[in-house]
């Protein structure tokens, strides 16, 4: 029943959706299955039914034809819900749309934050001091298991603990003035210069610009209880103490 005569039975609002990029370097389902099994450690809930964009821009032009039904089913097996394809040539568009997938040109990942100031040459402080801009989101309460927080278009500052099973995401950098136990994904729109800072870390997963690292064997004990930053160097996740020069 409508609440008022003027109210429509449907309402459309702009919503924020985060999708994992699954970048294919092979179209062989068996090879991809084996790689995903190794990547997830066989954990059935590793990806927790995330949305996924299949990025095929790295495949050679003469790569074998992609069986989209099989590819979508394979990702679904690992709790990844394919919603779009990126980097597809025009010859594939009809087959992709026929499978119910959207076409993504990847433009959102090319937007860099040109207003980010260059770091000062002074010695690093004992704790990170973020630049608070109008796009910065500040969370003052604990982020609990099952919760997801996304700072779209800016940085995320959390002044309380991020618990196991929680997920925090930012298009910019992430600053946690407490402990990080859950997942933290910075540079979600493709900003490789984004970083993750925390006063103490024992995360389940960290990611910068789609490059991620998990900690099944535990976080480095020498860094777990001190202010730490995580950054992306090439295609490698770098973990550094904010004070002494140590790296993992």
Image (spheres, rainbow, N blue to C red):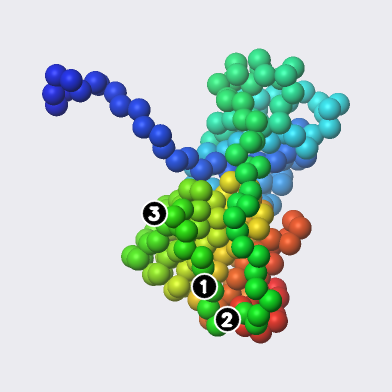
In the structure shown, which secondary structural element does the residue marked by tag 2 occupy? loop
Residues at marks 2 and 3, CA–CA distance in whole angstroms: 31 Å
Residue drawn 74% across the image and 23% down it: 89
| Residue 88 drawn at (x, y percent) | 71, 27
| Vertical arrangement, residue 58 with respect to residue 231, above or below | above
Q: Which numbered circle lies on residue 125?
A: 2
Q: Nearer the viewer, mark 3 or mark 1?
A: 1
- Of 20 and 135, nearer the camera is 135
Task: Report how far apart the C-alphas of labels 3 and 1 lie in the structure.
Answer: 25 Å
What residue lies at 40% left-to-right and 61% top-to-bottom? 138
Residue ID for mark 1: 129
What is the CA distance from the residue labelled 2 to the residue labelled 1?
8 Å
Tell me which corner region of the image, top left, top right, bottom left or bottom right, holds residue 105. Answer: top right
Crowding at dot 2, Cα within 10 Å, few <14 / some 14-19 / many 20+, comes out as few
When the figure is inspected, residue 10 is found, relative to residue 86, above or below; the finding is above
Residue 39 visible in the snapshot: yes
Q: Residues within 10 Å of mark 1 (few under 14, many from 20)?
A: few
Quarter occupied by the C terminus: bottom right
Q: Earlier in the sequence, mark 2 or mark 3?
A: 2
Are the residues at dot 2 and dot 1 in contact (C-beta closer than 8 Å)?
yes
Q: Is residue 46 visible?
A: no
Q: Residues within 10 Å of mark 3 (few under 14, many from 20)?
A: few
Helix, strand or loop status at disc 3: loop
x and y percentages locating residue 183 in the rendered image = 51, 59
């Amino acid at each position: 029943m409508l609440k008022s005569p003027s109210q429509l039975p449907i309402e459309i609002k702009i919503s924020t959706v985060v999708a994992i990029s699954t970048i294919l370097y092979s179209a062989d389902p068996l090879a991809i299955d084996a790689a995903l099994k190794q990547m997830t450690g066989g954990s059935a809930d590793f990806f927790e039914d995330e949305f996924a964009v299949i990025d095929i821009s790295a495949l050679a032009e003469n790569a074998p034809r992609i069986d989209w039904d099989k590819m979508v089913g394979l990702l679904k097996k690992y709790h990844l819900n394919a919603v779009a394809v990126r980097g597809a040539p025009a010859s594939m568009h009809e087959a992709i749309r026929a499978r119910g997938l959207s076409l993504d040109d990847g433009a959102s990942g090319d937007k860099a934050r040109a207003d980010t100031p260059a770091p000062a040459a002074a010695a690093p402080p004992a704790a990170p001091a973020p630049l608070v801009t109008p796009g910065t989101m500040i969370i003052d309460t604990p982020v609990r298991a099952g919760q997801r927080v996304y700072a779209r278009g800016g940085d995320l500052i959390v002044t309380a603990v991020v618990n196991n099973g929680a997920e925090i995401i930012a298009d910019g950098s992430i600053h946690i003035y407490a402990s990080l136990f859950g997942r933290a994904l910075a540079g979600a729109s493709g900003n490789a210069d984004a970083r993750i800072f925390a006063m103490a870390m024992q995360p389940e997963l960290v990611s910068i610009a789609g490059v991620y690292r998990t900690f099944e064997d535990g976080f480095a004990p020498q860094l777990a209880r001190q202010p730490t930053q995580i950054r992306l160097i090439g295609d490698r996740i770098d973990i550094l103490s904010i004070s002494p020069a140590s790296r993992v």
